[in-house]
Structure formats: C-alpha cells, structure tokens
Image (spheres, rainbow, N blue to C red):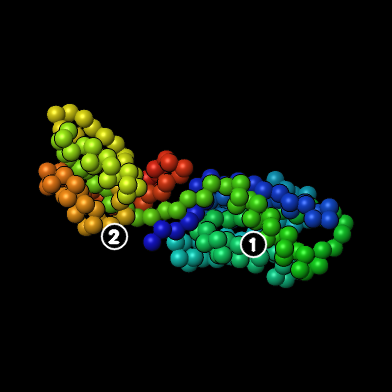
Amino acid sequence: MPYKTVHVGGQGEIEEKKSRFIATVRPVSSENEALDFLTAMRKKYWDARHNCYAYTIGSRFELQRCSDDGEPNGTAGRPILSVLLNEEIHNCIVIVTRYFGGTLLGTGGLVRAYQAATQAGLAASVIIARQTGRKLTIHTDYNSIGKLQFLLANEHIPVLDNRYTDTVEIDVIIPENNLLHFSEQVTEATRGTAKLRPGDLAEYADADGDILIFDN
C-alpha cells in the first residue's frame, strides 16, 4: 500500500498573541537521525523558550515519539504528533520552536497553535506517496508503439526509459498487485506481439511528474 512521507522538508511559521511558532519539517529514516536533527535545531534556536517535537518512523508508524519541552502536559508534542498521524505522514520529524510573546495562551490555545504551526510546516514541504512496484521492460515493434503509449498514459504508468533500435524497449514501473492486469492489457493492445520482462521490486513515488526510485 502507498504511504505518505516527506521528500523535501520545509519550514512554516505562525504568530499567536505575539508568540512565534516556527515549524521545521525533515524526513528521517531512523530515531538516531531524528535525534541528531533535534540536537541541531536546539543549537540553532538556543534562545527560544521551547523546542517541542514529534516524529514517526516506519511504514506502519512502528515508532512514535513526542515532547512538550516544558509546555503544559499534552499541549505541544501530542498535538504535533496528532497532525502527523491524521495526515498519515511517515518517517518525519516536526520541531516547533516557540518564542514566547508575553501572553499566556491557555491549554486550548497552545494545542491549536502547535497544530496550526505543524500544518504550516507540512504545507511548505514536498509530500510524496511511496509504494512498492515492479520494474518491467516492454519489447515491441514500431507498429505497436502508439497503442502502448496510449495504454501507459491512460493507466498512468510511469515510464523510466525508452530505447529505439530496430525494435523498441520501454522501461516502466507498476504497482506489484497490478502486474497481471497490466500484462493482460499489453497483450490485448498489441495482439500478443509485445513481450514483458519483469525486473526488480523497488519503492517509487511521483514527485510532480518526476519519478523517484528508492534503494531498499
């Protein structure tokens, strides 16, 4: 199943009653990576009142951590984490830095502020949906290339490469559970003239039209 994660982290900021809330988002693949980034942000924002955070690790949220960093219990870390879980963002850390503005917000105000800051940080980031796919090479002749191109476009199948010699080879990647159906469509579209050569499994994502392949 596809799962959402951060491809490029961003930063968002809100202001509430003169308190600044700066949300910094970064993709992470391990708890150590998350903690190293937290250490770096605490050094960068050493003069802030609070550096609250939450992170999730794993395609099934196997690891979840959060901290209020001195804010009233449950008003910062948990609200940040709840946004990540509600948005289903995996392998990500969000650190919300607060510069106190002199006015107390109350527990409800703090929860809303930390959630809004987290959402601003995610809005400034590039979110992608990663999924497992099977690489395929399609061998065909020039008579069938138009039908195959129509099929690939109609089914939104990512094309990784094209090679034109005396025949045509097209490298694609498709969801693993769609392999049989796609093979049948290729056979029907080309009347059995095209041949498929399955390749490796790989995780991939579409980032605004750019196909990203991840090493597992």
- Most extreme residue toward the bottom, as rendered? 73
Whether residue 40 is visible, yes or no, is no
Count of marks placed on residues = 2
Q: Nearer the viewer, residue 203 or 63?
A: 203
Q: Residue at x 38, y 49 (%)?
A: 204
Q: Residue at x 28, y 57 (%)?
A: 178
Q: Amino acid at mark 2?
A: Asn
Q: Please give left or right for residue 12 compared with residue 164 in the image.
A: right
* Residue labelled with disc 1: 80
Q: Residue at x 45, y 65 (%)?
A: 60
Q: Residue at x 58, y 56 (%)?
A: 93
Q: Secondary structure at mark 2?
A: helix
Q: Relative to 3, say whether 190 is above or below.
A: above
Disc 1 crowd rating (10 Å Cα; few below 14, some 14-19, many 20+) is many
C-alpha distance separating marks 2 and 1:
34 Å
Indicate the quadrant containing the N terminus: top left, top right, bottom left or bottom right: bottom left
Query: Mark number for residue 91?
Result: none
Whether residue 147 is visible, yes or no, is yes
Q: Secondary structure at mark 1?
A: helix
Q: Nearer the viewer, residue 168 or 27?
A: 168
Residue 51: image x %, image y %? 71, 56
